[in-house]
Image (cartoon, rainbow, N blue to C red):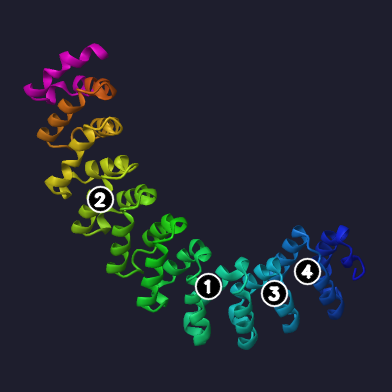
């Protein structure tokens, strides 16, 4: 096996055999085989080795682990091994490996999660390493969830600054929103609302915030959600969720926010959404609001058919001010 491990053509087969017969091989032989496989340069082999290391790294000597951690793919496996067996490994070796693994892009985000999950158990240099990793732009997408999920374990001000920094990273924006919403109670009130209000002005993530707000409407204080609704209503791709929110929570929102429905009903691109909402929530809406919307929507070709059906199905509930519309739009049916 040792000889075959030097042959790149059969390296993958050797790696698989190593996994099955690892405990039956002499320690010096299996360690040399691992080194040879690690140097094979084949991605498939590296992946097999990495998966093996993730489950068995504690069986290997420190010097071999340090040597293997220089390989990008093997580094991932060792990092996963530390994450899964944090308390089983000697502190000194574990900390050395974490420092080394933090230099590899494939394992840096795992190192960050390990540090965040065990923040109180680690020395200051490794705690500082977490914040150093968060400064790297290419780490933002992976680290944003780590920070949010472990916010209650981090120093508040530093955790806040990291999330604010990530909220300026284009690739991480939607992850910031979902990380905050899924860790809502862990993140201080002022921090979560400051970030969400900031992001609500960014086109590429406004629809994500609108969706998140719609699904968590009652979690937000009135002033914050009204400010968000005002900001989001000016952005593309948010009308459907805002309309749903207004219909579902009509009695909880002030008049100026309710008036967004009338603005949407006049927009060619989203009037259909208001019309659908009107049909589905006909009995929930106050009569005056309903009538105004029916009048406004009857003027648009895109929504006249929906208005006609709504009037026909609810004729006895309508005021004289609206019934006359039926003759105007009935021809469409």
Q: Is residue 326 magenta?
A: yes
Q: Position of residue 139 (x, y in %)?
A: 52, 65
Q: Label 3 vs label 1: CA separation? A: 16 Å
Q: Earlier in the sequence, mark 2 or mark 4?
A: 4
Q: Earlier in the sequence, mark 4 or mark 1?
A: 4
Residue denoted by label 3 = 69
From the viewer's perspective, is residue 280 above or below residue 28? Answer: above
The residue located at (90%, 71%) in the rendering is 2
Tell me whether the residue at label 2 lies in contact with that at label 4, contact meaning CB atoms closer than 8 angstroms.
Answer: no
Q: Label 4 vs label 3: CA separation? A: 10 Å
The residue located at (70%, 74%) in the rendering is 70
Q: Nearer the viewer, mark 2 or mark 4?
A: 2
Q: Earlier in the sequence, mark 2 or mark 1?
A: 1
Task: Give the left or right position of residue 240, taking residue 230 as reference.
Answer: right
Task: Give the left or right position of residue 43, taking residue 197 as reference.
Answer: right
Q: Which label is found at residue 38?
A: 4
Q: Secondary structure at mark 3?
A: loop
Task: Give the left or right position of residue 118, taking residue 159 as reference.
Answer: right
Tell me whether the residue at label 2 lies in contact with that at label 3, contact meaning CB atoms closer than 8 angstroms.
Answer: no
Q: Position of residue 186 (x, y in %)?
A: 36, 69
Which one is nearer the viewer's eye here, 315 or 145?
145
Q: Label 4 vs label 1: CA separation? A: 24 Å
Q: Secondary structure at mark 4?
A: helix
Q: Label 2 vs label 3: CA separation? A: 48 Å
Residue denoted by label 2 = 231
Q: Label 2 vs label 4: CA separation? A: 53 Å
Q: Which label is found at residue 112?
A: 1
Q: Which residues are magenta?
A: 310-333
Task: Give the left or right position of residue 11, taking residue 208 as reference.
Answer: right
């Amino acid at each position: 096996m040792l000889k075959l491990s030097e042959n790149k053509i059969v390296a993958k087969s050797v790696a698989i055999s190593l996994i099955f017969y690892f405990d039956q091989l002499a320690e010096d032989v299996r360690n040399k085989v691992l080194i040879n496989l690690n140097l094979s340069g084949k991605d498939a082999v590296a992946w097999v080795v990495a998966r093996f290391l993730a489950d068995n790294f504690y069986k290997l000597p420190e010097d071999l682990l340090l040597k293997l951690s220089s390989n990008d793919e093997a580094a991932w496996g060792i990092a996963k091994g530390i994450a899964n067996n944090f308390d089983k490994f000697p502190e000194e070796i574990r900390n050395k490996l974490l420092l080394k693994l933090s230099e590899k892009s494939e394992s840096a985000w795992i190192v960050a999660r390990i540090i965040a999950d065990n923040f109180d158990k680690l020395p200051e240099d490794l705690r500082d390493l977490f914040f150093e990793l968060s400064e790297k732009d290419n780490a933002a997408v992976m680290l944003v969830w780590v920070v949010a999920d472990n916010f209650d374990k981090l120093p508040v001000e530093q955790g806040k600054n990291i999330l604010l920094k990530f909220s300026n990273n284009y690739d991480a924006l939607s992850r910031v929103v979902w990380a905050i919403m899924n860790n809502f109670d862990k993140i201080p009130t002022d921090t979560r609302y400051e970030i969400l209000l900031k992001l609500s002005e960014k086109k590429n993530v406004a629809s994500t915030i609108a969706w998140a707000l719609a699904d968590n409407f009652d979690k937000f204080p009135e002033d914050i959600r009204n400010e968000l609704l005002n900001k989001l209503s000016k952005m593309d791709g948010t009308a459907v969720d805002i309309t749903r929110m207004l219909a579902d929570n009509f009695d909880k929102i002030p008049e100026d926010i309710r008036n967004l429905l009338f603005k949407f009903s006049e927009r060619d691109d989203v009037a259909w959404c208001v019309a659908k909402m009107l049909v589905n929530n006909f009995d929930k809406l106050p009569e005056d609001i309903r009538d105004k919307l029916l009048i406004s929507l009857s003027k648009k070709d895109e929504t006249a058919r929906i208005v006609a059906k709504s009037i026909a199905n609810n004729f006895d509930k309508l005021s004289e001010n609206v019934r006359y519309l039926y003759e105007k739009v009935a021809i469409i049916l």
